[in-house]
């Protein structure tokens, strides 16, 4: 399984990171038509993410067939997959065992899940919930009346896929329910091809957006890749995909057992107590002021005030996540020097010098002329502030009780 890094700070907690995923798609023509894996790949790429994928999608294939299909088994064992997507034949999950017989989905779903986990215990299984046929399933209407209509068939599919998801401690891509949301909201939008069963490009694009949101746990909204769709329609489908996934994450079991990383802290003067609020972690590693701690909730005493990066890395046996927070510790002893400081050059280019000030690791606030905070900056041991990331303009530097105006060229 791959590891990825989350970089956060107290000033930029909304940082979004690029993700690299490997996904194996196992299904039939509902996955193969319009090349769903490629659509997911393109959406991910347009969002700054990458996807390594493979698939096996023979027409009409069932879980029963996939569990013994040599190509399927070879592809499962070809690498350690981050995700394996399982899509059953379109009718079987909506029907009782009395009708499906040996093709009844649950036992074969469980066997496929076991095969996947035997290859890599860290692989996550995603059940691809399909949609009801446009006019229901006429071929089994008499034997199982709920499938006589689209609504009834969709309800049966939803329940069956959720049951398999729970039984296998997996997650579900709620594609069928995403389709239902669009059909209920605007029936004029056609998602089906001419057979009333397979997706047209609209349906496949909606499916791909839901699959992207399920796997990456990121919104597909604003993805620049829209296939051959009209831009307004693509944006609408992106929004519906976002809503169906993120409004019910717990229902779809998306991220339910995933590793998370985060921490808080309290302090008295220079003595800090750090507490991990990470979920599902089995080990912790902290880097604080060049000291390493391996316990979940360490304490650390800083030698002097300043700006320090505190990093927590957590592991759950599969994934590794890292969070870094920039912590401002205390305040420097400024009162005896603040009135003696002079700023030069002024205007300044990349570096502003504070003549008469040499307290290293001191932090100061810089404001714009409207009083808005531009940032917290560190004065190094030479009395210098790095202005290279600042835009040109006039600013106010707050040092202790004094305020100094300077210009950045």
Image: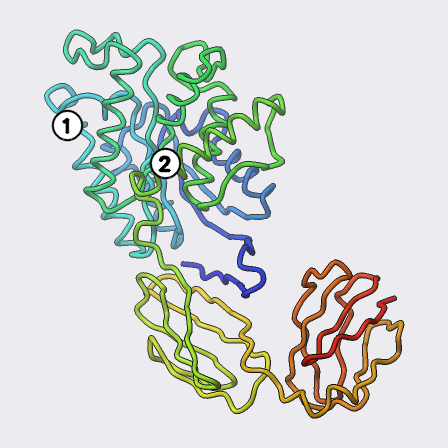
Q: Write the residue at 16% across / 13% down.
A: 144
Q: Quadrant of residue 155?
A: top left
Instruction: Estimate the spatial distance between the alpha carbons at disc 2 and disc 1, rounded to whole Å.
Output: 25 Å
Which residue lies under the disc numbered 2?
173
Q: Residues within 10 Å of mark 1 (few under 14, many from 20)?
A: few
Residue 350 at what x, y percent from top left? 82, 72
Q: How is the image coloured?
A: rainbow
Q: Write the residue at 39% across / 17% down.
A: 184
Which residue lies under the disc numbered 1?
102
Q: Nearer the viewer, residue 248 or 211?
A: 248
* Relative to 196, residue 350 above or below: below
Q: Is residue 17 visible?
A: no
The C terminus, quarter of image = bottom right
- Mark 2 and mark 1 lie on one chain; the one further toward the N terminus is 1
Label ID, residue 200: none
* Relative to 19, residue 42 above or below: above
Q: How many marks?
A: 2
Residue 122 at what x, y percent from top left? 33, 56
* Relative to 205, residue 53 above or below: below
Residue 30 at what x, y percent from top left? 39, 25
Q: Is residue 228 left or right of residue 74?
A: right
Q: Is residue 176 visible?
A: yes
């Amino acid at each position: 399984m791959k590891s990825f890094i989350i970089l956060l700070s107290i000033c930029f907690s909304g940082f979004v990171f690029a993700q690299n995923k490997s996904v194996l798609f196992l299904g039939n023509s509902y996955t193969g038509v319009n090349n769903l894996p490629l659509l997911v790949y393109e959406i991910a790429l347009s969002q700054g993410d990458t996807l390594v994928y493979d698939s096996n999608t023979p027409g009409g294939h069932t879980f029963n067939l996939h569990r013994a299909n040599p190509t399927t088994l070879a592809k499962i064992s070809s690498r350690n997959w981050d995700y394996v997507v399982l899509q059953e034949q379109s009718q079987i999950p909506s029907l009782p065992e009395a009708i499906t017989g040996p093709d009844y989905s649950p036992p074969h779903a469980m066997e496929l899940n076991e095969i996947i986990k035997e290859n890599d215990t860290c692989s996550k299984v995603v059940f691809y919930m399909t949609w009801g046929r446009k006019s229901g399933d006429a071929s089994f209407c008499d034997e199982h009346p709920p499938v006589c209509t689209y609504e009834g068939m969709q309800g049966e599919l939803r329940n069956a896929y959720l049951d398999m998801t729970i039984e296998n401690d997996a997650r579900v891509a709620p594609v069928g329910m995403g389709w239902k949301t669009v059909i209920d909201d605007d029936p004029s939008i056609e998602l089906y091809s001419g057979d009333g069963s397979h997706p047209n490009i609209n349906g496949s694009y909606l499916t791909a957006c839901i699959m992207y949101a399920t796997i990456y746990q990121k919104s597909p909204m604003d993805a620049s890749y829209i296939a051959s769709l009209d831009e307004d329609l693509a944006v609408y489908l992106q929004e519906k995909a976002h809503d169906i996934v993120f409004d019910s994450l717990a229902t779809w079991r998306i991220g339910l057992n995933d590793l998370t990383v985060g921490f808080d802290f309290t302090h008295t003067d220079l003595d800090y107590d750090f507490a991990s609020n990470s979920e599902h972690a089995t080990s912790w590693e902290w880097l604080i002021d060049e000291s390493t701690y391996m316990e979940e909730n360490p304490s650390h005493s800083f030698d002097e005030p300043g700006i320090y990066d505190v990093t927590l890395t957590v592991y759950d046996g599969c994934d590794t996540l890292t969070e870094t927070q920039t912590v401002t510790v205390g305040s420097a002893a400024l009162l005896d020097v603040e009135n003696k400081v002079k700023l030069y050059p002024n205007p300044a280019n990349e570096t502003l010098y504070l003549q008469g000030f040499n307290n290293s690791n001191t932090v100061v606030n810089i404001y714009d002329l409207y009083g808005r905070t531009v940032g917290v900056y560190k004065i190094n041991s030479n009395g210098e502030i790095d202005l290279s990331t600042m835009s040109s303009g006039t600013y106010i530097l707050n040092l202790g009780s004094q305020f100094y105006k300077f210009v950045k060229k």
